[in-house]
Image: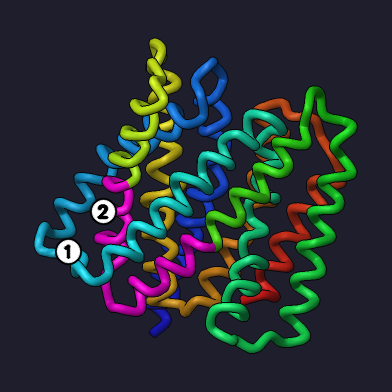
Amino acid sequence: MVQEEVLGLMYAVGALLSFSFSPILYKVGLKNELHVLEANTLRAWGAFLLLTPIYVLHGFTHIIPLELIVFLVISAISGPIVGDTFFLFSIRKVGASIATPLANTYSLIVVVLSVILFSEKITLLNTLGGALILSSIWLVYLERRSIKGDVVPGLFAGLGAASGYALSIISMNVLLNSKIDPVTIIYFRIILVGILLTLIVRTLNFSFRTVSRRTLLALSVGGFFGVGFGVILLLTAITYLGAGKASLIASAAPVITSTIAMALLKEKFRAKVIIAAILVSIGAIMLK
């Protein structure tokens, strides 16, 4: 029993580090004139290539039943396509330290959607957690004047990312409750995302300007950890620790990302943003 908890803890910490560092890599990959849709497309196919060995080792026999494909499609469109495109845009506009706490407010939206769609009950603790998350949004908004350029679109994009993630999570829960393993869900979702994004960028006549190896590597590795391996680690951790404990550890990602972005990417230190990231993490714990 103790060995299983230690193993689950290792998976959860791995997920935490994956979610914390992937936005930093996205920021590095966005330091050019690539459109965010082009960047997201390159990220998806790069993540696919890096995830393929894991899927091969996992076994080719795992597939998703036809009747559940609709939930895979909803999860792919709302999360990695809509949500992450908004997230990448937000990172470009306001930086990883601000975009990450905003995008992580998805936990509040998940609760609201669960009440609306499934008539789930909410507790006083859930309500207080929601209040903390709303307070974090207000703190980030107060910092808008200290950021260069037109930042309001970047702030709204962060919240748009949160909305996409929330719908994606609800759809993915249907797949998990159907006993489909995490590796299969994430692998086929990445393939679908890559195909759909390629069709979108080709339809919009994006040219895919010459991309440096550094950009391609940063986006690919960031995608591998952010929407691939990191999610697999978290879902695996849940099987050992339960959703509460595993999510508790992963919820610290916004604080770590904001701190790293300020330290490594030289983003301006903003006390309100750090406090907002902490409030998001605490609020997410209270909502679970």
- Quadrant into which the C terminus falls: bottom right
Q: Which residue is drawn at 59% across and 72% down?
A: 113
Q: Where is residue 31 in the image (x, y as percent from the top left)?
A: 56, 20
Q: What element carries label 1?
A: loop
* Residue at the far left in the pictured view: 61
Left or right: where does residue 93 sit relative to residue 134? left
Q: Residue at x 30, y 61 (%)?
A: 185
Q: In this view, does 179 lie above or below 170?
A: below
User: Given contact means CB atoms under 8 Å apart, are the residues at marks 2 and 1 in contact?
Assistant: yes
Residue 169 lies in the magenta stretch:
yes
Q: Give the range drawn in magenta.
A: 167-192
Q: Residue at x 89, y 44 (%)?
A: 142
Q: Where is residue 12 in the image (x, y as percent from the top left)?
A: 48, 63
Q: Which mark is residue 279?
A: none
Crowd band around label 1 with a 10 angstrom C-alpha radius: few (<14), some (14–19), many (20+)? few
Q: Which mark is residue 63?
A: 1
